[in-house]
Image: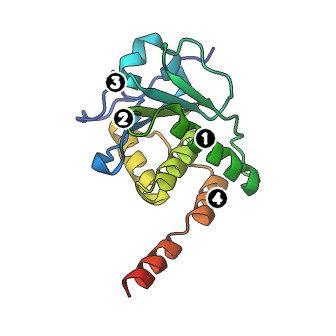
Amino acid sequence: MLAARKWPRAAASAICSHPCVAELELGPSHPCEVALCPLDVLVDARERHAVFRDAARRVVVCLHTEERPKGLPRGTKFVGAAMADSERVDATEMHAALEDVVRRIGAAWPPLCLQRVVFVCQAGVNRSTLALCYYLACAGTCTWQEARAKLVSAKRAAAVGWPTLANRAFEAFLEERFPEVAIDEAMQLTIG
């Protein structure tokens, strides 16, 4: 079992209910709440309210294992994808794994019924951030860079010094998969 971490508290935030649950402020651009937390917070029964915020229709996405964590509340849908946190990545395999994660999140509940998606890995730094950014970019909610900026802001409100996407290979994968230049050029072609 993982030892409980001591997370430094930040200044109070209206959306942040726990020092190690980062909740993204997406507004009406996305149909459900999106959050990220480390595994030890997810499996601690005392932290359930902070993780799920009373959302009955929820999905937990674990990026470090394909096994359902013990103690998840009944009715919680689970998506597992054992991804390595490595500087050496196979872009084709990573793309297939992330597409599968996005597909399984969408299949968990009927459209517009899902209330909350919680991304989890052991520390909530690389794999969960990669999947969260990929999910929001695929959904058209925002670019992966905007998703990362929203997550950095949410983490800053949750815990001082909580790193975000420290794996350069993951960042390069997102840059290649979702090139912002191509989006800008497409917009100019459509407008012009």
At 72% from the left and 40% from the top, the residue drawn is: 84
Q: Do we see residue 159 in this rendering?
A: no
Apparent side of residue 80 relative to residue 160 in the rendered image (left or right) = right
Amino acid carrying label 3: it is Arg
* Measured Cα–Cα span from mark 3 to mark 2: 15 Å
Q: Residue furthest front?
A: 110
As measured in the structure, the alpha-carbon distance from the residue carrying label 3 to the one carrying label 4 is 32 Å
Quarter location, residue 174: bottom right
Between residue 95 and residue 153, name the one nearer to us: 95
Q: Which residue is mark 4?
A: 173
Q: Amino acid at mark 4?
A: Phe
Mark 3: few/some/many CA within 10 Å (<14, 14-19, 20+): some
Q: Which percent across, then down, holds residue 164?
A: 50, 46
Structural distance between the alpha carbons of marks 1 and 2: 25 Å
Q: Earlier in the sequence, mark 3 or mark 2?
A: 3
Report, in whole angstroms, how far the alpha carbon at label 4 lies from the one at label 2: 27 Å
- First reached walking from the N terminus: tag 4 or tag 1: 1
Closer to the camera: disc 3 or disc 1? 1
Give the distance between the C-alpha atoms of the residues marked 3 and 1, in whole angstroms: 22 Å
Q: Which mark is residue 53?
A: 3
Q: Is residue 103 above or below residue 57?
A: below
| Residue that carries the numbered disc 1 in the rendered image | 101
Under tag 3, what secondary structure? loop
Identify residue for label 2. 158
Decide which of tag 4 and tag 2 comes sooner along the chain.
2
> Could you tell which of marks 1 and 2 lies nearer the N-terminus?
1
Q: Are marks 4 and 2 in contact (CB under 8 Å)?
A: no
